[in-house]
Amino acid sequence: MTRPGTAPHKAEKTTKIPRWVLGLGPLVLIAALIALFSLLNAPGLTGLGDDRPPEEAVVVENIELTDGLITLTVRNEGADPVTIAQVVVSDYYAGFTQSENQMAHLESNTVTVFYPWVQGDPYDISLITSAGGRVGATIDAAVLSPDKGTSFFGLMALLGIYVGVIPIGLGLLWMPFVRRSSPAWIRGLLAFTVGLLVYLTIDATLEGIELVRDNASYGGPLVVLLGAATAYLILEGIEGWAHQRTTHPATKPAGIANPGQLSPQMLSLLIAVGIGLHNLGEGLAIGSAYAVGSLALGASLVIGFAIHNTTEGLAIVTPLASQRPPLTRLAILGLIAGAPAILGALIGATVYQPTLAAFLLGIGAGALAQVAIKLLPMLKDNTGRTLTPLTAGGIITGLAFMFTTGLLVIT
């Protein structure tokens, strides 16, 4: 309000800084600080490591044997560059060539050693660096690595079908038995499924950690946990999207009484996805075993995994006990769960890398854990209890069955 005879004051204009500028500002300041630090040649830090010996941490990721040659794939997981200067095979200094004269941090190198190895003999290999360090590798029994041609990849695809698609397809044949079971039996079968998924979760996690136990490249065992967290969050996001669709009046599918729960179709799909990601890791194990010429090991893996995976089909169809799904849906679920074994075998036979394999196993573990958690509410009886004698016994039976059949898988 203004006094008579005085002109009204103009409203003061306030200039607002754009929100994107406020968000970008700290990043620009950090970049400027780093640039200044570099221009000043890192004051206070330059020269601190001049007197220390180089940190050499090299791991052998793969070994292949051909006529008169031993080919090793190695990676530098340390901070300092590394140069391979000599190669010793069973106390014999052997000639060699390498793809890189010096390996930077996380860089790989292919070392081809000229050595007349003998079929079935064991060998100890030492890679000696220019600083005098030694990197060891062992060949328990020398076997000629298979020729990776068209027939080899066809064999890998066939093995994936044997391990993944066929056993799970046979397990889907339990559908009529599941549909005729009583509610109590259904809860027991669901508990058996939970035990199966929990076992596979633990198994995939331990396998992934074992692969990178002595390999700190790209984080070592941490990549298993990152893979598990990634898969878990992705499936949670998919579930959230499914809940939004079922709770929206215009898109709510018919026949869902409680929109707060996943439909049986979505649960069986999530189980198939989780099992499929796990079978991807199994395919990696088989493909890598054959790629390095361990044919007996590969055969035992095929037989063990085939028996091991038959029960996974039962896990997929159990949530559909009250449904009458068409055969096409069951076939699609079986392919989702089993076909990744084919892809895994092909990857393992060609570009096998321990860190990648560990990450994929972690993804499988996270997916399986997420599905197991979502199945727990379906175990509740009329009193609201989840762990009853029936369901607890079902979980234990699932764990015991998978452990027993897992003993057939010789790794």
Image (cartoon, rainbow, N blue to C red):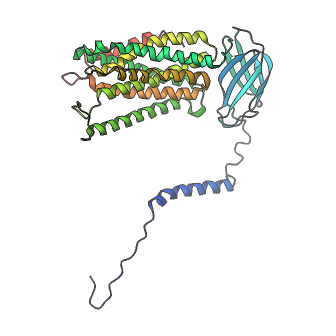
Residue 201 showing in the rendered view: no
Quarter location, residue 384: top left
Using the image as rendered, state which of residue 326 and residue 296 is in the foreground.
326
The image shows residue 208 at horizontal and vertical percentages of 52, 24
Residue 11 or 257: which is nearer the viewer?
257
Q: Using the rendered view, name the quadrant where residue 132 is placed.
A: top right
**Residue 225 coordinates in the image, percent (x, y):** 48, 31
Left or right of 397: which side holds 221?
Answer: right
What is the quadrant of residue 137 in the picture?
A: top right
Please count the marks in the image.
Answer: 0
- Looking at the rendered image, the quarter that the C terminus falls into is top right
Q: Is residue 94 left or right of residue 286?
A: right
Q: Return the x and y of residue 287 as percentages of the image width and height.
A: 57, 19
Q: Please report the residue visible at 37 percent of the width from the left and 35 percent of the height from the top.
A: 238
Seen at 64% across and 17% down, the residue is 292
Query: Could you say where residue 216 lies in the image, as x and y percent from the top left?
Result: 59, 30
Residue at 48% x, 28% y: name it. 362
Residue at the left extreme of this rendering:
383
Q: Quadrant of the N terminus?
A: bottom left
Q: Is residue 52 visible?
A: yes
Left or right of 302, for residue 53 = right
Side of 14 relative to 118 (left or right): left
